[in-house]
Image (cartoon, helix red, strand yellow):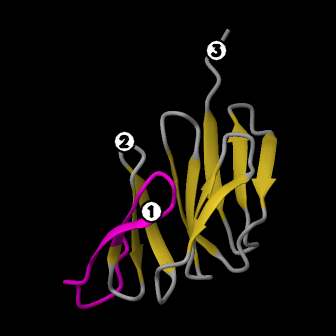
């Protein structure tokens, strides 16, 4: 028996999808109001997404919203999560934000001169 794994994707349809190892849809998250541009997942199965609606979202393993972070002034084009649950988001506002596990801003880095993609 093979091990179960998942793929997470975002799209122009404003949705995040969880897809199982057989290619079946597990759930879709429809909490964004514009194109999903970035997706990351942590070791506990929480999913983090960034969108052209200038927001980053934390989605629980069942596909429900945990929180929405709206501290950026432009598209959220990159998201990453560390082993302690802190989220790092990059944006068209040329900033990187560190977001705590509860969805609050920890700090902002403003040293870039252009959109932060990664």
**Residue 116 at x, y percent in the picture:** 34, 78
- Between discs 2 and 3, the one toward the N terminus: 3
- Between discs 1 and 2, the one toward the N terminus: 1
Identify the residue under disc 3: 2
Which residues are the magenta region? 97-118
Identify the residue under disc 2: 84
Q: Which mark is residue 79?
A: 1
111 to 28, vertically: above or below: below
**Residue 58 at x, y percent in the picture:** 59, 56
Camera-side residue: 75 or 7? Answer: 75
Considering the numbered disc 3 on the image, is that residue within a helix, a strand or a loop? Answer: loop
CA gap, disc 1 and disc 3: 30 Å
Camera-side residue: 68 or 47? Answer: 68
Q: Which mark is residue 114?
A: none
Residue 25 falls left or right of residue 51: right
CA gap, disc 1 and disc 2: 15 Å
Q: Foreground mark, 1 or 2?
A: 2
**Residue 76 at x, y percent in the picture:** 49, 76
Q: Foreground mark, 2 or 3?
A: 2
CA gap, disc 2 and disc 3: 29 Å
The quarter of the picture where residue 56 lies is bottom right
Kindly give the residue lying farthest to the left in the view shown: 111
Residue 39 falls left or right of residue 65: left
Residue 111 falls left or right of residue 50: left
70 to 93, vertically: above or below: above
Q: Are marks 1 and 2 in contact (CB under 8 Å)?
A: no
Considering the numbered disc 2 on the image, is that residue within a helix, a strand or a loop? Answer: loop
Q: Main secondary structure of the magenta part?
A: loop
The quarter of the picture where residue 34 lies is bottom right
**Residue 35 at x, y percent in the picture:** 66, 77
- Is residue 37 on the magenta stretch? no
């Amino acid at each position: 028996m093979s091990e179960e794994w998942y793929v997470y994707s975002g799209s122009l349809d404003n949705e995040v999808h969880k897809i199982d190892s057989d290619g079946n849809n597990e759930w879709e998250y429809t909490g964004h109001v514009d194109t999903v541009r970035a997706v990351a997942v942590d070791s506990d199965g929480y999913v983090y997404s960034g969108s052209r609606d200038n927001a980053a979202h934390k989605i629980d393993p069942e596909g429900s919203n945990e929180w929405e972070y709206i501290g950026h002034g432009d598209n959220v084009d990159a998201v990453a999560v560390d082993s302690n649950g802190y989220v790092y988001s990059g944006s068209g506002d040329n900033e990187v934000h560190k977001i705590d596990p509860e969805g609050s801003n920890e700090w902002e880095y403003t040293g870039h001169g252009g959109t932060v993609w990664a």
